[in-house]
Image (cartoon, rainbow, N blue to C red):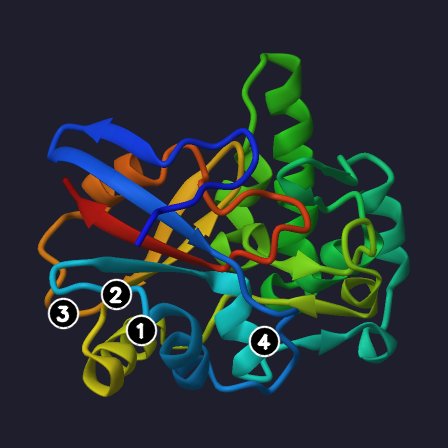
Amino acid sequence: MEFTANKNKSISIETSTGDYDRCAIQTHFVQIGEDYIELVKRYVKPLWQEGDLLAVAEKIVSLCQNNVIPKKDVKVTKLAKFLSRFATQHNSAGIGVGDVYKMQYAIDINGGAKVFLAAVCAGFGKLVGKKGIFYDMVGEEVRGLDGFYPDVFPIYGEFGIPLPKNPNGVCNEIKEKTGISCIIIDANDFTRDILGKSDDVTLNDEQLCEIIRDNPAGQDDQCTPFILIRKK
């Protein structure tokens, strides 16, 4: 099998644990409620070899779990409208809390007082050149929320996509039912996070992030939620 990469991405990468090839596996446009096990069997299993590691984009897992927040169900408060005016709406990494729906999500899971305090602290942080204070205070669930914008796929403007539920359990299920070692990643062109991994994965999160440090899955409309990783 010949490995393929997304545009402006490299197949091979050098890391502290060795050199790896990464194959970006294209799928159809995955809809809410599909079966991630069947997707892995359909798209990944025919290419997989013993020893390969599969990296799965977190968004696809959440969609398969029906883990979405319909925009029509979000009750936007005055506080969310006020605070979102002072925040970044979105950039190439995704939606920001300048979008009123994501700000409301932060309020819903943290409470208005905590989010207000986080916004104030973030404002002071900007004065001294320190970024990321808001998300450090409100947590990874807010930072990881996707959706609520139609820039790439119009349907994603209709709902938000939280981080997947029980990511370690999902990875172990994939391993059990397909034989493929698995990690779930939340990656963009700025940050990489390992959300879950099957119990047989021996590399730590820092080492795994090295392998995907250039975000081989891409950030636009590639439809490549699966990255098959093979050590050279």
In primary-sequence order, the first of circles 3 and 2 is: 2
Q: Amino acid under label 1?
A: Lys
Residue 63's disc is: 4
Which residue sits at x=65%, y=76%? 68
Label 1 to label 3, Cα distance in Å? 19 Å
Give left or right: position of 86 versus 92. Answer: right
Q: Secondary structure at mark 1?
A: loop
Near-viewer residue (210 or 179): 179
Local crowd at mark 2 within 10 Å, few (<14), some, or many (≥20)?
A: some
The residue singled out by tag 2 in the image is 48
Which residue sits at x=65%, y=81%? 32
Give left or right: position of 196 versus 36. Answer: left
Local crowd at mark 4 within 10 Å, few (<14), some, or many (≥20)?
A: many
Which quadrant would the N terminus be assigned to in this image? Answer: bottom left
Label 4 to label 2, Cα distance in Å? 23 Å
Q: Position of residue 103 (x, y in %)?
A: 74, 54
| Cβ–Cβ under 8 Å for marks 1 and 2 | yes
Q: Position of residue 170 (x, y in %)?
A: 33, 78
The residue singled out by tag 1 in the image is 45
In primary-sequence order, the first of circles 4 and 2 is: 2
Label 1 to label 2, Cα distance in Å? 5 Å
The residue singled out by tag 3 in the image is 199
Image position of 179 with respect to 104: above or below: below
Depth check, mark 4 against mark 2: the one in front is 2
In primary-sequence order, the first of circles 3 and 4 is: 4
